[in-house]
Amino acid sequence: DFRRGENNAGMIVIDLAKSNISAKVDQTGSRLNVEFANASLDPRDQVKLDVNDFGTPVHDVSLFLQNGKVMLQANVTGKYEYLAYQTDRQYVLVPRRGRTQPVGRCASRYDGHRRRCDEPAARLWFERLLA
């Protein structure tokens, strides 16, 4: 399933057959690949969805078999960040447009000093991420 989430994020929602299926996400440029271990997919259920009209950074989403493994591939345009999580029998991948400027000192370049993530800008970023 594909949905348009908050702040124009793309939400890719996969219903899993069992809760013990694990997933590994790999980000390569404009492509997000998710490999599902211990999963199977009927070849007739392989699909490619053009989701460009949803107004999210996600251009298309594919679900297919590759070397005997179930793969999800999302092609994303522009700068983006993503959140991936699994709750029981549902896996959710949320790519959204990334920030073009750092947020507060926590997002600045590491200079060898500890950064506190309770600084107001960092706290706001975490609250948005978890909302």
Image (tube, rainbow, N blue to C red):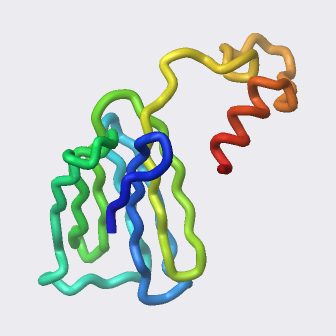
Closest to the observer, 22 or 6: 6
Examine the image and state in which quarter residue 36 appears. bottom left
Relative to residue 106, is residue 91 drawn left or right? Answer: left
Q: Residue at x 65, y 41 (%)?
A: 128
Q: Position of residue 115 (x, y in %)?
A: 83, 23
Q: Position of residue 99 (x, y in %)?
A: 51, 25
Q: Residue furthest top?
A: 111
What is the quadrant of the N terminus in the image?
bottom left
Q: Position of residue 106 (x, y in %)?
A: 74, 22
Closest to the observer, 65 or 74: 74
Relative to residue 65, is residue 18 drawn left or right? Answer: right
Closest to the observer, 7 or 37: 7
Tag count: 0
Q: Residue at x 33, y 39 (%)?
A: 57
Q: Position of residue 15 (x, y in %)?
A: 41, 79
Q: Residue furthest left?
A: 44
Q: Residue at x 28, y 34 (%)?
A: 77
Task: Relative to 85, say whether 56 is above or below.
Answer: above
Task: Relative to 105, say whether 99 is above or below.
Answer: below
Relative to residue 39, is residue 127 drawn left or right? Answer: right
Examine the image and state in which quarter residue 86 appears. bottom right
